[in-house]
Image (tube, rainbow, N blue to C red):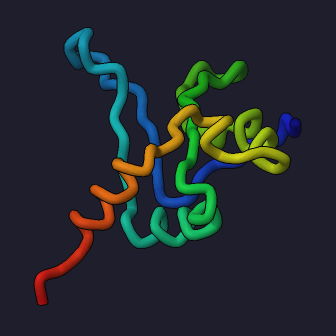
Amino acid sequence: MSNEKSFPKGIRFYDPKENAPDFIKGNIQINVDEFIEYLQDFKKLGKLHLQVLKSKKTGASYIDLDKYKMDKLKDSDPSEVFGSKKTENQIGDSKKENDLPF
């Protein structure tokens, strides 16, 4: 597992403003085109795990790729790592939802 930071393109996390209510933990901004392009690299995995971390130097929060889970994916079935294997019924249902009537 690499300790190198891997900032996902197109998504930014900002700490809440000083006067924000306690229930606001942060703000996320997504540049749709950049993020979709970034997601293409992970399309065959079906999922992408990100972490919100805090910088040791500045204390600011940031989003990073969860490399621990991604490294585990190299040698295993993604559903084993992410814990979300679809049943035959779920797969059939999702196909029906995506079918267009025209």
Q: Position of residue 58 (x, y in %)?
A: 63, 23
Nearer to the camera, 71 or 34: 71
Q: Position of residue 16 (x, y in %)?
A: 34, 25
Nearer to the camera, 34 or 79: 79
**Residue at far front of view:** 88
Indicate the quadrant containing the N terminus: top left, top right, bottom left or bottom right: top right
Q: Residue at x 65, y 46 (%)?
A: 78
Displayed quadrant of residue 72: top right
Q: Residue at x 59, y 19 (%)?
A: 59
Q: Residue at x 67, y 35 (%)?
A: 81
Nearer to the camera, 20 or 82: 82
**Residue at far bottom of view:** 102
| Residue 39 in the figure: left or right of residue 17 | right
Displayed quadrant of residue 49: top right
Say above or below: 93 vs 18.
Answer: below
Q: Position of residue 24 (x, y in %)?
A: 27, 20
Say above or below: 76 vs 39.
Answer: above
**Residue at far left of view:** 101
